[in-house]
Amino acid sequence: MQASQETPEELRRAFGHLPSGVVAVCALVGGRPVGMAASSFVPVSLKPPLVSFCAARTSRTWEALRQVPSLGVSVLAEDHATLCRALASSAEDRFADVRWQAGESGAVFLPGTVLWLECALDSEVEAGDHVIAVLRLRGTALFPQVRPLVFHQGHFERLGSSQPPARTHASA
């Protein structure tokens, strides 16, 4: 193996070989729902309960979300590819055709998802062109009958189906 000389596009393609779940990170900001999609979500610690995801350092959405006291993390379901594209877009109103509900804390959750996590920003770590946001868990709601959306090689896929999944390209 030689030292890495790949372009950002080649690295994105290489990193895409790691299948991952997709989450929506959402909250009320100024009384309106604001949210973003992230495929870099991971559990970090049980004591204290921490999770993390990565956001581009240039993300205006993360800049708005990081200011609020409570964030809702919704693990997207296998039928949420269109919703994920909307949340990943640069559209001003990503919630125009999206059902959502806000908790008393201002955390926003999406119905029909696998899991809801209510969180608060614990810390941030600069990591190249991204920031790793570490969130402290405040509460959970599980929906075990719902199957997760999986992102792999630039496509949304279904987990563990016995038939080949209908591959949907992630770019809009």
Image (cartoon, rainbow, N blue to C red):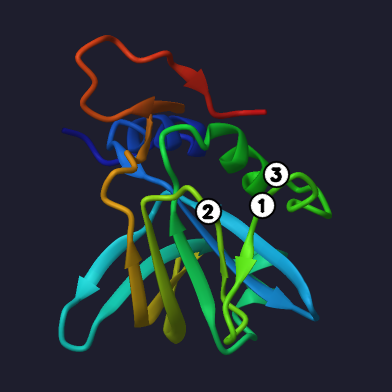
Q: Give the crowd class for mark 2: few <14, some 14-19, many >=20 residues within 10 Å.
A: some
User: How many labels sit on residues?
Assistant: 3
What residue does disc 1 label? 99
What residue does disc 3 label? 89
Image spot of residue 63 (x, y percent):
67, 74
CA separation, marks 1 and 3?
17 Å
What residue does disc 2 label? 111
Q: Is residue 22 found left or right of 26 in the rendered image?
A: left
- Residue that appears at 61% across and 33% down: 82
CA separation, marks 2 and 3?
20 Å
Residue type at tag 2: Pro
Dot 2 or dot 3: first in sequence order is 3
Q: Nearer the viewer, residue 11 or 93?
A: 93
- Residue that appears at 63% across and 46% down: 88
Q: Nearer the viewer, residue 60 or 1?
A: 60
Q: Nearer the viewer, residue 25 or 110?
A: 110
Image spot of residue 12 (x, y percent):
44, 36
Residue type at tag 1: Arg
Image spot of residue 91 (x, y percent):
80, 48
- For residue 77, which quarter of the picture? top left
Q: Name the residue furthest right.
A: 92
Q: Is residue 138 above or below residue 129?
A: below
Q: Give the crowd class for mark 3: few <14, some 14-19, many >=20 residues within 10 Å.
A: some
